[in-house]
Each structure stands twice: as C-alpha cells, then as structure tokens.
Image (spheres, helix red, strand yellow):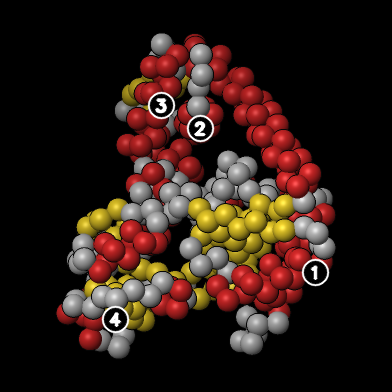
Amino acid sequence: MDVDTRLLRYFAAVAEEGGVTRAAQRLYVSQPALTKQIRQLEAVLGTDLFTRSRNGMTLTEPGRALAERVPALLAGWEAALRETRAAASRAARVLRVGFLASAANEATQPIVAGFARRRPGWRAEMRQAAWSDPSAGLADSDVDVALVRLPFPGQEALRVLPLFSEPRCVALAESHPLAARETIAFHELRDEPFVAAPPETGRWREYWLAADERDGHPVRVGAVTEHPDDWLTAIANGYGVALAPESAARFYTRPGVVYRPVTGVGPSGVAVAWAPADDDDPVVQDFVRCCREALRTRPDGA
C-alpha cells in the first residue's frame, strides 16, 4: 500500500492540534482542503482515524496507533530524501536554488556570481517554483536553499534570513478605471475581484489578498493562477486585480497590464532559507554568505 507522505504530515498536524482549524492555520492550507486530505487517508487505510464532535477531533484506537509511528517515519523519510538529493548534488557540484518569481530581484545575479567565485567548479542551478509552493521547493527537499517571499507557509521549521523588503503595489488592466490614478488606496480595491494563488496555499494566498487589511470585507476571487504568465494574462483580460511586489513592474511587463503604488498594505520581504540540517553544510552556508554580501553592496544600501 502506497501512502503520500503529505497525507501523513497533515494527519500528524491534526492529531497534535486536536482539530482541523488550528492544524490548517499551522499548515497554511484551507480547512476544506485539509478535511479532504484526512478523509482521503482514512479511505486509503480503510478505517476512521478520528472521532468528530463539536469540541474537535479525537483519535480513534487505529488513529492513536498511527500517530505513535508517524513522526519518526516522516523524520526518517525526510532525512533520507534530503541526504540522497544532497549527495547527488555534491557529486555533480551543483547547488539547487529554489526561487519564486523574481527571486532576489536585481541582487540575484550578483549572488550567483559571488557563489561561483567562492566555489570554483560549482554551479548554482536556479529552479523556479510555482506559487502553489511558496517554500520554493524546500518543504519537499527538492532544493538545497531558496530565495523566498515572506511570509510563507512552514517558515518556522526552516532557517530564514531576511535580506530586504519592498513595498507592495497593485497590478491591474490598463483599461481599469483606477489605472489612471498615480496612487491607489487599498480600501478602493476591497470590492474588486482579485487574481489569487491556489486555495491550498492558505495563509500565503491570504497575504497576497491582503486579508488582514480588509476590515471584514469579503474577498472576491476572479481567477486562480500558479505561474506569472497565467497571472498576467488573467489581469490583462480583466478577470481581477492583484497585489505584487514593487519589483514586478520591472520584471513582469506586459501590454495591457499596469502597476500602481498602493497605500494601506505592508511591504513584502525577501529572504534566503535553508533546512536546519544544513546549518553546517559549507556549500549552503557559502551561498547564504553570498546573499549577505550582495545585499551589502547594493547601491540603495538595502
């Protein structure tokens, strides 16, 4: 019988939190998505793992048996996966670097160049992740280190070094009535349809929908996308507006899409992240040093 390890991680979180609500917040997934995954695991195993009640969820006898084994099982699998992939990278002298969208903006090339100087014969292999994976591959050990946007799901389990922050702006169709403005207040956008990340990204999606700045106004979702090209197409077609880092105006230009400064929302942070197990990995730490050095030499002093 094959069981997806993601299902086991979700099960472990619900078992520890005693309910779907807190577990979903911890995992940065929606409650319906988490409930569906738990039901799927129960179907695969052929037994109920939880007893549901108004007060939450308690483990059944089979559930307790599984809960005792899952933490060690997951830890062992993640360690084996990480070590296998790291060994393959070391053999090829490749550092796998995950990133989202524009990564560290204009600092990305100096970071990569600095790593090449520090590690002759090594190559930083840049791997762009979809927005459905805000950890840029770190959560599944697909990369050794990542350039990420803060906040992102699961960051408390990783080492995260903030590098710089930048304001958020709004991207909207050139024909949108607000496109003629030089600056737009976020409260003017609260009733607009938004182009959103997939629901399973939970808190990440909420952050880019500015859920905390809506004063109770519900979110209207006009389209859901995972990749920059699809995102730009949805905006250009008028399916919705979207918050974006200020640098998106430089990196993601497209006819029919304009970017405007927006007030009333906080900035977006960029960070380099890695697994705690790699605190003593000299190659990973060299890349982290290159991130620090590249930011110290930025013209704006960031």
Residue placed at 72% from the left, 63% from the top? 288
Q: Which mark is residue 184?
A: 4
Q: Of discs 1 and 2, which sits in the foreground?
A: 1
Residue placed at 81% from the left, 59% from the top? 121
- Secondary element type, mark 3: helix
Mark 3 or 2, nearer chain start: 2
Q: Amino acid at mark 1?
A: Arg
Relative horizontal placement of residue 153, taking residue 262 as reference (left or right): right
Q: Amino acid at mark 2?
A: Arg
**In the rendered image, which residue does mark 2 sit on?**
6
- Secondary element type, mark 4: strand
**In the rendered image, which residue does mark 3 sit on?**
38
Q: Of discs 3 and 2, which sits in the foreground?
A: 2
Relative horizontal placement of residue 97, taking residue 17 as reference (left or right): right
Mark 2 or 4, nearer chain start: 2
**In the rendered image, which residue does mark 1 sit on?**
117
Kindly indicate the quadrant of the structure image that contains residue 263: bottom left
- Secondary element type, mark 1: helix
Q: Which mark is residue 95?
A: none
Kindly indicate the quadrant of the structure image that contains residue 139: top right
Q: Amino acid at mark 4?
A: Ile
Relative horizontal placement of residue 115, taking residue 173 as reference (left or right): right
Mark 3 or 4, nearer chain start: 3
Q: Position of residue 249 (x, y in %)?
A: 41, 77
How far apart are labels 1 and 2 at the CA level?
A: 38 Å
Of residues 68 and 287, the one nearer the viewer is: 287
Of residues 177 and 16, the one nearer the viewer is: 177
